[in-house]
Image: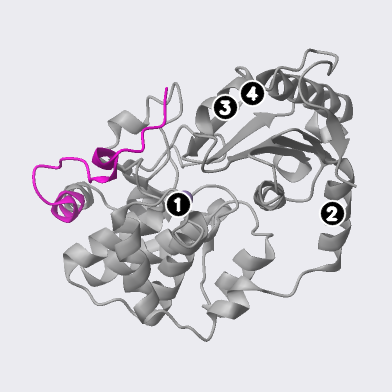
Amino acid sequence: MTQPEDQEHSAAPNFQGSSLAHLHETLRAAAASSSGDRLLVLTHRGPDPDAIGSLEGIRFLLDRSLGIKSDIVTVGRIHRAENLALVRALKLEFGDYEEVQAERYFGCMLVDTQPGFGHTVIPTDIPLLGVLDHHVTPDGDSASAKVPHLDVRLGVGATCTIVWDYIRESGLELDQTVATALFCGIRYDTKDLSRNVSPLDEEAYYATFRRADRAVLPEIHNPPLPRRYYAELHRALDLASQHGPFVCCLLGDVSHPEFIAEMADFFLRMRGASWVVVGGFVEEEGEYVISLRTDQAFGNAYPLLQRVLDGKGTFGGHGHIAGGRIPIERAEEGGLEEVEELENLIRAAALAVIGKDEDGGAGPLERDLI
Ligand SMILES: [Mn+2]
């Protein structure tokens, strides 16, 4: 499976006319044959700005344009300071997945993820009616194909852009909170239009920025960091090693998955680095989480992660970003040995890509960062 980035993948799927009308018709038909009168909206575990913005945007669209009341519920705590600041600054409120009462809902929708991803849970007793996403459908995901309103646009940099496209089609004017949330999603998933960007992302970025609350943007961009963050950063710097164009940082235990993604972005900024693998075991979630990044010149991250994971766990990606998760069987007992073994396999597979053998011989020289 490859990661196409050409223009045709930026377009909405052919819903025989309007995407908005198709979504509306799908939801209306489901609501008519159910006793539930609300729609449940979900995303992946530990939502990032693109997920958070998409959730807010879709709630706004459903309410104001389609007259459908919805509830947003999230799974997994938000840890990253920037993401917490986004929720706090915009006073966003999400429900708890554990408290969902299925009978209240005629259906559910997923944004910024698909049913086959390991970091995504959906209730089994609520029909999944819609998916808006920009990731490659994971291998073996048969559930996505059955979703009545499936809008997956691989060439688009942010799910917020897709949501904005629906809002634009509806003719609604963005309110300030929704515009700010959507802008943040597009800004962080495309790194201010510098990666995975399509013309639609550009349009959405400027349109949402025009209406965004500029006073809160710096607060979200540079929030205060907890003390613990600096300790974790110290460990990451200690553990990272460089092998020519490749930087590897396998952290053992880590407090939350967003830190892994953040470190991947951070190490990719190093001069001379063109691809990066960062991984760590998140005990709370019972999974080993891995992030892979490539620079503009290096090419797509997805097939590279496929090689590094070598059939383990679930993974996905778009453009220069890819991520995967591997369940740790004995997570309750700390999973120590298992994590160590896994990290050895990941390191060996990644080093094989740059021509190093199992013992780390041949290929580019290994250097500690510090
Ligand atoms: Mn996204």
Magenta-colored span: 1-25
Q: Residues within 10 Å of mark 1 (few under 14, many from 20)?
A: many
Indicate yes or no whether the magenta region holds residue 57: no
Q: Position of residue 324 (x, y in %)?
A: 60, 34
Q: CA distance from mark 1 to mark 4?
A: 27 Å
Q: Are marks 4 and 2 in contact (CB under 8 Å)?
A: no
Q: Which mark is residue 309?
A: 4
**Mark in front: 3 vs 2:** 3
Some atom of ligand 1 lies within 8 Å of the CB belonging to the residue at label 1: no
Q: CA distance from mark 1 to mark 2?
A: 30 Å
Q: Which mark is residue 304?
A: 3
* In this view, 147 is above or below 226: above
Q: Which residue is mark 1?
A: 42
Q: CA distance from mark 3 to mark 2?
A: 26 Å
**Mark in front: 1 vs 3:** 3
Q: Is residue 55 left or right of residue 249?
A: left
Helix, strand, or loop for circle 3? Answer: helix
Q: Which residue is mark 2?
A: 232
Q: CA distance from mark 4 to mark 2?
A: 24 Å
**Mark in front: 1 vs 2:** 2
Is residue 52 or residue 64 the one in the foreground?
A: 52
Please report the residue visible at 37 percent of the width from the left and 24 percent of the height from the top.
Answer: 142
Q: Position of residue 162 (x, y in %)?
A: 32, 54
* Coloring scheme used: one colour
Whether residue 68 appears in this view of the structure is no
Q: Is residue 335 left or right of residue 120?
A: right
